[in-house]
Amino acid sequence: MVAPATPKSWYLPSKPHKFCPGCGHGIVLKALGETIDELDIQDKTIFGCDIGCSLLAWDFLACDSTQTHHGRTTPVMVGIKRARPELITIGYMGDGGGYSIGSQHLLNAAVRNEKVTLILVNNTNYGMTGGQMAPTTLPGQKTETSPYGRDPDLTGYPTRGPEFISELTPEGAYVARATVSKYKQLRRFLRNALRNQIEGNGFSFVEVLSTCPTNWRTNAQQTWHFLEDEMEQYFAVGELKSPFGRGDK
Amino acid sequence: MFLEVLISVQKVIGETKKAFLTGNEAIVWGCLAAEAEIMFGYPITPQNEIMHYWTRLAPEYGKGFLQTEDEISAGFTVCGAIQGGIKAFTATAGPGNVLMQEPFGMAEAMRLPVFAVIQQRGGPSSGTVIYSQQEVSLTAFGGNGEGHRIVYSTATHQELYDYTIKGFNTAWKYRFPTFLLGDGYQAKMREPLELYEPSERGIEIIKPHALIGVEGYISEGREPQHLRNIYSMEEELYDVVLGFEAEYNSIKNDIIEYSEFQCEDAELIIISHGVVSRAAEDAVTALRSQGVKAGSFRPITLRPFPREQLLNIIGKSNAKKILIAESALGQLERIVKNEIYGQTLPIETLFMPGVGIIDYDIMQKVKSIL
């Protein structure tokens, strides 16, 4: 049996990684590592992560990396990019960090068409803090702060991030939603999002639907079912805005 | 071409000249003289004109500016730019200073040489847009940390220029967040001052350096830089904080600044900071002409505080009493009392929160306590 190759841009001393079994972060970071390798940008990539589970990636990559407060990854990456436009800045955050506490940074960075790439991992809850309701929690979904299921009358409907970001951004921006269940598509979207920054076209944003069996309290089969049949039904996967044309190979 | 750029960078001011400027203008010239590269800011009175003058001068000197969505973002973009190795700064006041405590905390934790101008306005809350000395505690000890910061409290426009240059140098030399603590009066008043090239006064401008995106190639064996401000274990954080404390204490004496006025034979020492110290010195002169032996002590650095210096000055004087005067309800007083614990002289206070203090106010107070 041949073991799958480890991306060159993974930092080996920090492996095995610290995510829970069944967590989707490992898949996203594998796709990101392979994309960094493919585009040969390891030496000029700055990886920045938020507080939340994304924090566990603070030393994941063999790229210069920084870590900030909950929701503040976007302005830190904007500051780095404005200071050093030759660097490729990748912000990595969860749905709470991006759509809740950091939403006004995300929204305004999108409006300004900041030349950064942001990856937001959507697992419908605050994983690190113990599974509270997130902006992306599905109607009826039980979490620690919606123990009887999310009631949209009280707490609204789940945030569809790429949809609002694609409305806010001008031409040149790249906006997509991927899922860890479609790996090749995830790779393609990440490639486009990074290519877009390399070419200096504009803001690049990829939401990735991901899994959280620990807080969903699901087994493997239930986990995959929730991702593919429930999340992907509410959150449509695909490219919403791309300077490269739809369905770019 | 390169030489031209070099010359333009070195000669922002050119020959030393007298100027008659508002404080906010003086600060901008100081930022240019200190070779600051980019400002991130958000509108709030009374610091707005720092952004106004900076954005007018920025294109001429090839400098950057971004008006962010709020003060939180302004602080964090400064943190990002600094990690990238660029001299970045911001300016704020009042509720904006409250919001910026979050990024200032990150700067403290990651030893980022943030330089920020605080033009104090009245508080609490939105308070007034005018003036106060009520942001002392916040600026010196804000955030969920231990106040490993450096705070210069200025009193004149000359100092606004001088300590802007010095503030950037202090920040980049020692890597503790550094603050120029002014106020709305200093921001908006016009006053004469001298603008000079730092090199003309023997001041070497400290060059910035990057923490990420550094020299060398990871693909060729350089270790990646992994910066963080969160730790898994209590003991890890404990070691980090004690390390900061040890380093802060070891550089204290290089940073501490103060001024004193006629304390030597004084029977009463007035302690004040910032613009209030000007009223205190005027009051000392007037009181002495009326036969009252007063003196004035002014900490220029509120953090670190000139503790030994104040104790020495008190010890050498004939002081029977101390008067603390400030445009706040005891923010300086709490620091002073904490620093000179064990001193048994009675302490009187003149607290006028959010209101200017003139020599007359101090003289009246002194006469009432003699």
Image: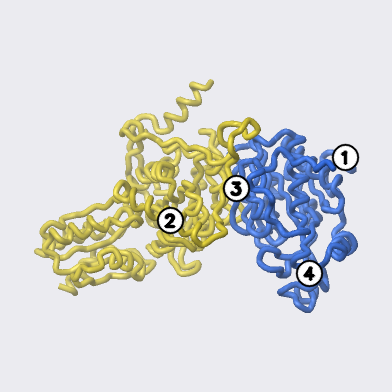
Chain colours: A blue, B yellow
Name the residue that disc number 2 marks: B119
Q: Are marks 2 and 3 on the same chain?
A: no
| Mark 4 vs mark 3: in front | 4
Quadrant location of residue B12? top left
Left or right placement of residue B151 versus residue A121 in this view: left
Label 1 packing within 10 angstroms: few (<14), some (14-19), many (20+): few
Q: Are marks 2 and 1 on the same chain?
A: no
The chain to which mark 3 is attached is: A
Circle 2: residue type: Gln
| Mark 2 vs mark 1: in front | 1
Using the numbered discs, state the Cα–Cα distance from disc 2 to disc 3 in whole angstroms: 30 Å
Name the residue that disc number 1 marks: A248
The chain to which mark 1 is attached is: A
| Mark 3 vs mark 1: in front | 3
Measured along the vertical axis of the image, is residue B136 above or below residue B246? Answer: below
Using the numbered discs, state the Cα–Cα distance from disc 2 to disc 4 in whole angstroms: 51 Å
Can residue A185 be seen by looking at this rendering?
A: yes
Q: Residue at x 63, y 37 (%)?
A: A85
Quadrant location of residue B333? bottom left
Of label 4 and label 1, which has the lower sequence position?
4
Of label 3 and label 1, which has the lower sequence position?
3
Using the numbered discs, state the Cα–Cα distance from disc 2 to disc 1 in whole angstroms: 52 Å
Name the residue that disc number 4 marks: A217
Circle 3: residue type: Thr
SS class of the residue under badge 4?
loop
Using the numbered discs, state the Cα–Cα distance from disc 3 to disc 1 in whole angstroms: 31 Å
SS class of the residue under badge 3?
strand
The chain to which mark 2 is attached is: B
Name the residue that disc number 3 marks: A66
